[in-house]
Amino acid sequence: MFTSESVTEGHPDKLCDLIADAVVDHYLELDPFARVVSECVASTGVLFIAARFASEAKIEIPEIARSIIHQVGYDHAEFNAKDCTVLTSLRELPPEVVPAVDEADLTEEALERIPARNQVTVFGFACRQSSALMPLPITLAHRLARRLTAVRLERRLSFLSPDGKTQVGIEYRDRRPHRIHSITLIAAQQLAQTPSPAELREALIEEVVKPVFANEELRPDEATHILVNPDGPFITGGPAVHSGLTGRKNAIDTYGEYARQSGAALSGKDPSRIDRIGAYAARYAAKNVVAAGLAEECEVQLSYTIGQARPVSVQVETFGTGNVEDDEIARRLERCFDFRPAAIIRDLNLRHLPALVKGGFYRKLAAYGHMGRLDVGVPWERVDRAEALK
């Protein structure tokens, strides 16, 4: 059995990711060549934002944070957009330290001269457990978390607060999902409208669990454990109850711990950061391997070192499911994909997406996963290189 969890956008960690990525979006929308790193901490009545940036764009970071808090739905006395204290620590870097470069116009020689500025090993993974070629536990956990948010925003369950958490346990046989072992829903409730535990359980099963599994091939059975707030009532939730921090939910952002992921945070970084875009490139490669039919499961590992443009290592693991040797798949990947940082930015158009996608691009990835997203036109979810890999 394997379990994966997800959280709603009102979870304090995800709230911090949303704000960090909203800052990145606003800079890139005005200045596609901006360099920015943004991190947040949230607690009772307080939000702290630390940002380093190099850009001629001028944005109001505290107002961006308040806008996100309001959109997520926090209007509690302990934490809300109007009364929350927003503290900032901002450092502007001189433009000559990080000169603007348009990767689309670079020659091969110029691409080679733009190295990775971080040392990191990133992983990409894909498998045939779901239509998005993602592991089934994290896919279902995300769907439940999104549904928790939807029924709150639609006022179907108006007593819910923005903070929530889900977990799905899947029993496997021969590396394939066999049955739903357990479903756990942790939902914060508004203090003034708190239902009884029995009423909450019935409402969440009817409005969240059943709609999510209605069209799934694998559904809960009579032996499936459905747990609702198993640790007792969860009142109000959010930063008033537990603090939040950018980058603390890496497994939720990637593969639900079914596969490896880098220890580096994804949110709050512009596309020049290889620890972010390298993870996207690795997922892009792994998904195309599976889509090409070269393997049922595929993990791609890219290792970067400071000062070099190309990864020092490209490795593939297919866990015994490959139709060709793993080393041969790795060779094909290096022929069909360019894993140099500037080439990744160019091929995935990562600098210009915030201006092209209404409402921002990166902030939409901050909750419900950066991988397997088929709802926001994510370029690393394309399978356009599968034929070439064959």
Image: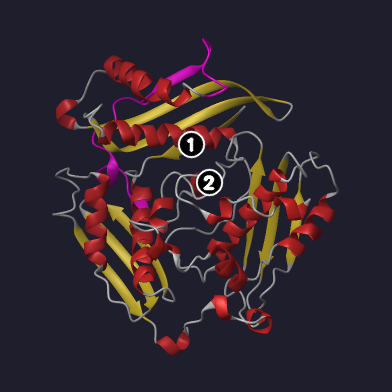
* Count of numbered tags: 2
Q: Amino acid at mark 1?
A: Glu
Q: Amino acid at mark 2?
A: Ala
Residue lying farthest top?
222
The reply to whether the magenta stretch includes residue 219 is yes
The reply to whether the C-beta atoms of the residues labelled 1 and 2 are less than 8 Å apart is yes
Q: Earlier in the sequence, mark 1 or mark 2?
A: 1
Comparing 270 with 246, the one in front is 270
Would you say 162 lies left or right of 230 here? Answer: left
Splitting the image into 4 quarters, where does residue 319 fall?
Answer: top right
In the picture of the structure, the residue carrying the numbered disc 1 is: 5
The residue lying at 66 percent from left, 66 percent from top is 339
Q: Residues within 10 Å of mark 1 (few under 14, many from 20)?
A: many
Would you say 382 lies left or right of 203 here? Answer: right
Q: Is residue 137 above or below residue 295?
A: above
**Where does residue 389 sit, x and y in percent of width and height?**
76, 53
* Residue range corresponding to the magenta coloring: 216-245
In the picture of the structure, the residue carrying the numbered disc 2 is: 251
Q: Is residue 79 above or below residue 173?
A: below
The residue lying at 55 percent from left, 27 percent from top is 169
**Where does residue 124 sit, x and y in percent of width and height?**
64, 52
The reply to whether the magenta stretch includes residue 287 is no
